Image (tube, grey):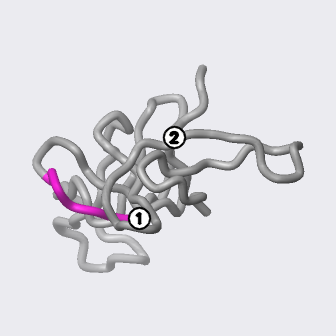
Amino acid sequence: MSKLHIKKGDTVYVNSGEDKGKTGRVLKVLVEKGRALVEGINMVSKSTKPNAKNPQGGIVKQEAPIHISNLNVVDPKTGKPTRVGRRESSDGRTFVRYAKKSGEEIK
């Protein structure tokens, strides 16, 4: 399987779907399914039984996974969506991700 262009903590832009045009932070990447949980994106209503965390129970809104093909990393320089590239770092031992639009390194 190839490496994914998205990591936990990245700020991403949604390309398609109900939340098209919104941005959010990646909470979790589900590598085997090719999906990611993004904060405030793809919210679904879920029924829950009463428990210690939610003693009342009822309907809870939570994020559902969204396919990573529908996400683009936000360029740290311009704040617009961009594709991600990889290049060797200055020490020559590791690879760093960079924004293809501005050439800026993605932290």
- Name the quadrant of the N terminus: top right
Picture coordinates of residue 65 (x, y %)? Answer: 34, 45
Question: In the displayed structure, does residue 92 sit left or right of residue 96?
Answer: right
Q: Nearer the viewer, mark 1 or mark 2?
A: 2
Residue that mark 2 sits on: 5
Question: In the displayed structure, does residue 51 sit left or right of residue 10?
Answer: left
The residue under the point 41% across, 50% down is 101
| 74 falls in the magenta region | no
Q: Which residues are drawn in magenta?
A: 19-25
Specify few, some or many for label 1: CA neighbours under 10 Å numbering under 14, 14-19, or 20 or more: some
Dot placed on the residue nearer the N-terminal end, 1 or 2: 2
Residue at the extreme top of the image, as rendered: 1
Picture coordinates of residue 81 (x, y %)? Answer: 33, 53
Picture coordinates of residue 84 (x, y %)? Answer: 49, 43
Residue at the extreme left of the image, as rendered: 18
Front one among 78 and 7:
78
Mark-to-mark CA distance, 1 and 2: 14 Å
The residue under the point 50% across, 46% down is 6
Q: Secondary structure at mark 2?
A: loop
Front one among 17 and 59:
17
Question: In the displayed structure, does residue 43 sit left or right of residue 80?
Answer: left
Front one among 74 and 27:
74
Picture coordinates of residue 75 (x, y %)? Answer: 42, 60
Residue that mark 1 sits on: 25
- Name the quadrant of the C terminus: bottom right
Q: Which amino acid type corresponds to the residue marked 1 in the rendered image?
A: Arg
